Image (tube, helix red, strand yellow):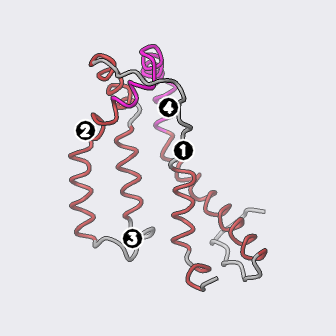
Amino acid sequence: MPRSLRRDTGTLTLLFAVAFAFPIVAQDSRAITPPDSAQVAAALTMIELMHVGDDMIDGIEAMLSDSTNPNGMPQEYRQVFLEKARTRMPDFLRLLAPMYAARLTPEDIAQVSAFYRSPAAQHLMAAGNAIGAETAVMGERWAYKVFGEMMIELGDAPPATPPASNEN
């Protein structure tokens, strides 16, 4: 295995982000009926309540950061791209809304929207950034451990453990 892959913690971090930050949802096998405009509007409200756009911008920002992408897009391009992404995110959400509306019933959309308006959901969303940050740290430690086990099984030296790792 090439030394660059063995020691490339950026790749390991990216693999972790893809595996855990963007869960893959199984395709719904039901027939999809084109939604009407009221369903699409309700779905748009729902995804706005869910802060889907904010989460996507946070993910893009993390992917473009110096720590995860040190040799990637130049800083001035990142700034302009992020500004444009923030400005254009409502357009993207309008593209997503029909997909949600087609796959969820009006009742589902109403119930999800009601939940995201509730105090419990507001608390969950407020705690989400802290939980996400803690999950990323724990996940990186876990990923180092799994990656190290794999390297040993393949007859190679494991990567150095992350600082302050307390994972068993």
**Which residue is located at x 50 percent, y 42 percent?**
128
Magenta stretch, main secondary structure, is helix
Q: Secondary structure at mark 2?
A: helix
Q: Relative to 128, is 143 above or below? A: below
**Distance CA(mark 3)–CA(mark 4):** 30 Å
Q: Which residues are magenta?
A: 98-126
Q: Which amino acid type corresponds to the residue marked 2 in the rendered image?
A: Pro
Q: Which residue is mark 3?
A: 66
Residue at 72%, 83% (x, y): give it.
Answer: 157
Q: Disc 2 or disc 1, which is closer to the eye? A: 1
Q: Is residue 22 left or right of residue 42?
A: right
The kind of residue on which mark 4 rests is His
Q: Disc 2 marks which residue?
A: 90
Closer to the eye: label 2 or 3: 2
Amino acid on which disc 3 is placed:
Asp
Quadrant for the C terminus in the image: bottom right
- Picture coordinates of residue 130, whole percent (x, y): 52, 47
N-term-proximal mark, 3 vs 4: 3
| Secondary structure beneath label 3 | loop
Q: For marks 2 and 4, give the one nearer the viewer.
A: 2
Of pointers 4 and 1, the one earlier in the residue sequence: 1
Q: Secondary structure at mark 1?
A: loop
Q: Which mark is residue 123?
A: 4
